[in-house]
Amino acid sequence: MYKGIKNWHLSVLIGITSIISIAMIQQYALAQWNDPIGLPGETSGFRLVVNPMTEDLLLNGHDLVDNNLRVDANGSNVIQVSNGGNICFDGTNDCIDSWAGASGGLWEGVSPGDIYYNNGNVGIGTTTPSTALEIFDTNADGSNLKLQNSAGDMRLIFQEYFDPPTAYGDMSIRYNGTVGGYNNWLEFWGRNPDTDDPIMTMQRDYNSGENNYLGVGIGVPAETNIDAKLRIQGASGGEDLFQAYNSSGNVKFVIDANGDVGVDGPVHSGVPLFVNGNSAGSYGLKLYYDKIYSYNNDLELYATHQVYTHNYFGIGTDNPNTNLHILSHSGNNAEINIQSNTNDHWGIYQSNGTGDLHFWNGDNRVTFTEEGELGIGTIDPNAYLHVDKGAGQNYAAFFNGNVALQHTSGGPYNYLQIDHVSSGATPPVVDCDEPEENGRIIFDYTNNELYICDDSGWISSIFN
């Protein structure tokens, strides 16, 4: 009896001890693992819910495996996705079906827009890009690169140097869109687009409603309408606007910053057009609006009142009336000078005062009056032919041949009038003592005596 009771008591004691142990184990486990605060209880969508724990969750080398997901605790590929599954971040966004390795791989597997990554290079349409970005396609316009911005302005920036720093790189290409009312321009800029002019501008029509190509500008200030197919603009004293060279590297045509032009050599500052005679520009032809002259040569032509038109050339007149028309101004004589070597020049001029035409060589030699009289040795002829022999001359005129005075029927008589004196004495002996003086005639009307020179001296005859 006692033995049976004792065994019953022991059984109860063991039961009580077991219940207490189970309660303590449950309390300890619940203290380490609780449902996340604010989350629903376990459902069919949550197989494992982890709340911040005081200790790590250890799998002890075991894998976490599902149909499409595997967490391999010991393998090199820790997380694996199979059966076409994607890895997604932020719910269903930012999903990708494969990840590129260090040696290259596929980023986007939707044909034909595949994007590949290869050792730092990105390829679109090619698995072996050889540059930072390479776009390949076999169709026309299939490799186009499109930049689109609803705000209008866009840039491609090229940067090599970082000193001084600039937000626009060393060079940039800017699409000038809707900012400031300008539309559809392409501008090439240097390091500081905010203060400098664009290096080059390609412009469509200034008005956004038009679709007409206008032109290209070089050095034109930003947001300036270009009204030519090519407009080149520079600052005074800056670089040349244009230079053209031949295949040997010799300059053939230059326009400097002020618009002066040099042909076959350099520009001469202040000369609108200089045609170089040599590559150094040490001589050549200078052209101005009012004159043309040869630099370092003996040619000078001032174009004021000098006109060449319809095969007539005028000097001093813009309305020449013959092949050569010379007109003087301001009371000057109209004159032409002719000179050979170092000889004294001959001048031909019309007197501004009398209108007579003179031939001049040290003095007036021949004169044609407006009345048609000819004076030789005199500027004041009193006959149609008036010859003045001048001092030291033997003859005023010398005729090697006959001289005829011919009467015209019904007209006046023609006379030969010789010199006459009223001395009443024989002419001087010295005027008739040389062979070339033979034949001289003079009439002394005091005695009505005619004197003739021959080899014997003066002979005479008296007429009553």
Image (spheres, rainbow, N blue to C red):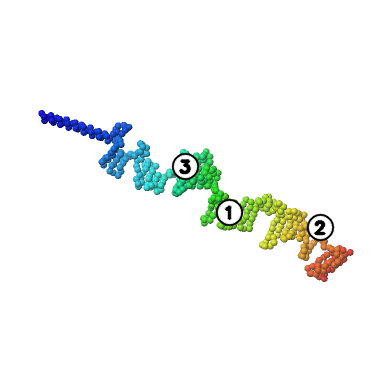
Instruction: From the viewer's side, name the closer residue of 103 and 83.
Output: 103
**Amino acid tagged 2:** Thr
Local packing at callout 3 (Cα closer than 10 Å; few below 14, some 14-19, many 20+) is some
Distance CA(mark 3)–CA(mark 1) = 43 Å
* 10 left or right, relative to 407: left
Q: Mark 3 vs mark 1: which is more N-terminal? A: 3
Q: Mark 3 vs mark 2: which is more N-terminal? A: 3
Local packing at callout 1 (Cα closer than 10 Å; few below 14, some 14-19, many 20+) is some
* 275 left or right, relative to 67: right
Residue 2 higher or lower than 328, as above or below: above
Residue 284's spot in the image, x, y percent?
59, 56
Mark 3 = which residue?
A: 154
Distance CA(mark 3)–CA(mark 2) = 105 Å
Mark 1 = which residue?
A: 268
Mark 2 = which residue?
A: 408
Residue 40 higher or lower than 239, as above or below: above
Query: In the image as oriented, which residue stretches furthest toward the left?
Result: 1
> Are discs 3 and 1 less than 8 Å apart at CB?
no
Q: Secondary structure at mark 1?
A: loop
- Name the residue at 31% across, 34% down: 36
The C terminus: image quadrant: bottom right
**Amino acid tagged 1:** His
> Are discs 3 and 2 less than 8 Å apart at CB?
no
* 13 left or right, relative to 276: left
Residue 391's spot in the image, x, y percent?
77, 64
Q: Quadrant of residue 421?
A: bottom right
Instruction: From the viewer's side, name the closer residue of 279 and 83.
Output: 279
> Are discs 1 and 2 less than 8 Å apart at CB?
no
Residue 16's spot in the image, x, y percent?
19, 31
Q: Secondary structure at mark 3?
A: strand
